[in-house]
Amino acid sequence: MRHYIKISLLFAGILILSAQTPSTREYQLKAVFILNFTQFVEWPPNSFSSPQAPLVIGVLGKDPFGNYLEEVLSNEKINGHALVAHRYKSMEDIEKDCHVLYINLSESGKNEKIITNLKGVSILTVSDNPDFLKQGGMIRFYTKDNKIQLQINPEAAKSANLTISSKLLRLAEVITPKLKSK
Amino acid sequence: MKTVRFKYTPAMDQQHIYCRFSTFLLLMLLSLSLLPLSVKGQEDSLYQPSYLKKMSLEELMTIEVTSVSKKPEKLSEVASAIQVITQEDIRRSGATSIPEALRLAPNLQVAQLNSNAWIISARGFNAAFSNKLLVMIDGRTVYSPLFAGVFWDVQNVLLEDVERIEVISGPGGTLWGANAVNGIINIITKNTKDTKGLYASVAAGNFLKDFAALRFGGQIDSTFTYRVYIQQQDFNRTTLYPSGNDNNDAWGYTLGGFRTDWKPTATNSLMVQGNLYDGMQKTIPEKSPMSGQNALARWTHDFSERSSLSLQGYFDRTYRRDVPSTITDQLETYDLDLQHRFALGKHQNIVWGAGYRYMHDKTKNSTLFVGFVPPDRDMNLYSGFIQDEISAFNNHIKFTIGSKIQYYTFSDFSLQPSARLAWTPNIQHTVWAACSRAIRAPSRIDVDYNLPTYEVPPGFPNVNGGPNFVSEKVIAYEIGYRVQPVNNLLLSLAMFYNQYDDLYSVEALPGTLTFEIQNGTEGYSNGIEFYGRYEAFKTWKLRGGYTYFFKELRNKPNRTYDFAALGNDPEHQFLLQSILDLPANFQLDVTARYTSSRPNPYIIDYFTFDARLAYVFKQLEFSIVGQNLWQERHTEIGTTYIPQKFYAKLTCRF
């Protein structure tokens, strides 16, 4: 019985510790990946309201990055555009001047709706969702052998007037989903 | 069997030291919970934005997401007491065989009986005929239907090519094959695409007499990879307890084989492997030979991310002539398994499967004193299972329900249902609970055992196998908690309560001296299994655990069997493995373990540790290993002294 008590004490201690845990290492890495994407993707000039307008990285749904995304983006500039992070609770909150959108919604059904809504808008969509590219998304993170890898659907990016550099495509698995009849 | 309850040994003087050690180890475990706070800053410095931002995309893609061994992903394992031994854990422990590697799972009870025999069980029932474990090597079942236990001396693989060993304590749920009553050991070797190149290693020492291994792996084209290997190992003898006289158990074997992996398209893969071994134990008056050959093929087809089909077949032949026990056994096994997984709507995954195994077993008794009657048996095992994995509340709740159905030559149809529930409030925490029923089907030693093998006149004592022996049964209740509070720490706690019925007994038929094998024992067990993995720094990893076990058996009404023979289990067990990279390419690794005393017959508790010092120079690795270093010799389960072992090893990997 003594051991039961000791073990439960041990676990109580760990629970308290874990409450303070910030974003996980996985999302710290992903935040840096997203920063890198901005260097390998070309947005049409009209997607910025002015040459000084910031490049907006949006996080839709639950935020897995915590403060880390801000830390990564601080003091970074791409072609004169400062990088900023915005958080969106729901689809309706997405601003017109968003450039990269990380979608973190548990219901993949909603993804499809979001992507349909964003049709023609020059937003680089990124997600972890396994069906993301099939639904028309552009970049998907997946984990292989405990390492983060990329899948890219260049067709989807093209139709949003985004140019993804071949440097980035070379590192990713290029996926071209069959066109759906609808 | 005579029962020695208490025997004085010189080692007993050290007993109070051992007791202090158990407290010491517990304190170490407790202090681990505080370490993350103090070193967290250091650990995270690697993940400072400024550091990562300097990296190219290529470099980012090579960074490991989790440093501690990955949490189980298969749903069937989420809600179970799974512990994983990785390739690195094995290599850095200095283990020379699968049983030694299994010591690294604190939820297993591993006892070395003599040079070539090991007693391994999960959740107790540690005895010479431990029989409630399912052991698989790359999907091939290796427990023997002769006694439903495992001949550990012939379960050898090239340890370098082992990817990981999954150890699940508790009933295997629905997915796993027969005999998964108290645990499953799943030894998984690497895909051949990960073993390209040459590996050569030689070692020699006082117990591991000589060891040589050679493996070559390559690829024919980008879809087809292969490896071939050969390994030879000889082990010294042990000494007898308590006399200290030499034991006649020195042994050795040669093992060789191949594996190919072919992935012609993205959705199809075919794995084929074959292994053969030949060994010899230096028993008296004659040597005891053993040999075996096996071949396995598995084809997997992915229909989609959530749907796949896998078909596996294997052949396995084992032969051993055991001179001391006067029994020769040759077993041929043919096995075919099908597994199909598919999604039913958004929230359900169905897995179902069917299997058939045919076993042809031939025994020969060199005396009439003891043996199997009839000597030969054909056995058929039909099995099927279906399981539904249901997820709800945004995957925070996962519920698995299913059942295995089995028909075996020695038992009728049996249902083995299980229900498992996992709650994952966030990525760091999993709370799970499970309830399952499992059976240990009768084996030949329960049904066909005879002493002597001829009819005796009335009034003469004899032992007969049980014509009415039925499966042993367990209902297991488990709860567990798994947490990864920070990236470099994984902790897991499992508690169980097992209720057993129809356990083995041997009793005289009323009014005669004819003893018959029956199901006259029942009882329960409970325990706690704690397991942790912690990467303190990139250069220092710790893993270990603690297992508490308690069991109480009783005779059914009017039965008189001495059930002590069913398991002589230690109450407490600790393990701590430290893997440390030193500057200048040195490695220093220590694995310490403690096993408390065993009650009946009384066996003193022991603490001991293994240490490994290695130096890596380019493709060469030179290591010296000492095993069981705490004292000159110790007993683990009673009949022999296990000595201190030393060896030196040279390995090259090209």
Image (tube, grey):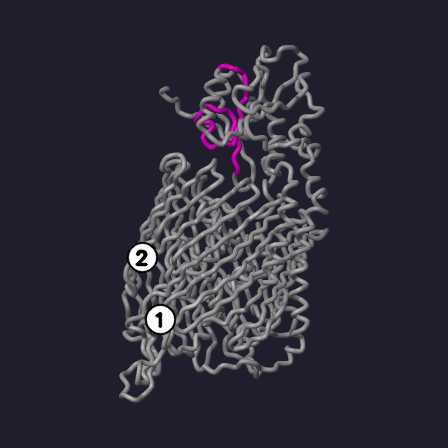
In the rendered image, residue A141 lying in the magenta stretch gets the answer yes
Q: Nearer the viewer, residue B286 or B347?
A: B347
Residue B108, percent from left and from top: 52, 62
* Callout 2 touching callout 1 (CB < 8 Å): no
Left or right: residue B133 versus residue B546 is left
Q: Quadrant of residue A7?
A: bottom right
Q: Nearer the viewer, residue A143 or B533?
A: B533
Query: How many numbered marks does the figure carry?
Result: 2
State whether residue B247 is above or below residue B315.
Answer: below
Residue B378, percent from left and from top: 27, 65
Screen quadrant of the C terminus of chain A? top left
Q: Nearer the viewer, residue B185 or B207?
A: B185
Q: Secondary structure at mark 1?
A: strand
Q: Residue at x 55, y 41 (%)?
A: A146
Residue numbers of the magenta segment? A120-143
Left or right: residue B14 versus residue B338 is right
Using the image, name the chain to which the residue with label 1 belongs.
B
Q: Quadrant of residue B462?
A: bottom left
Q: Quadrant of residue B239?
A: bottom right
* Residue B162 visible in the current orientation: no
In the rendered image, residue B268 lying in the magenta stretch gets the answer no
Q: Given the image, on which type of amino acid does mark 2 rest?
A: Gln
Residue denoted by label 2: B406
Residue denoted by label 1: B519
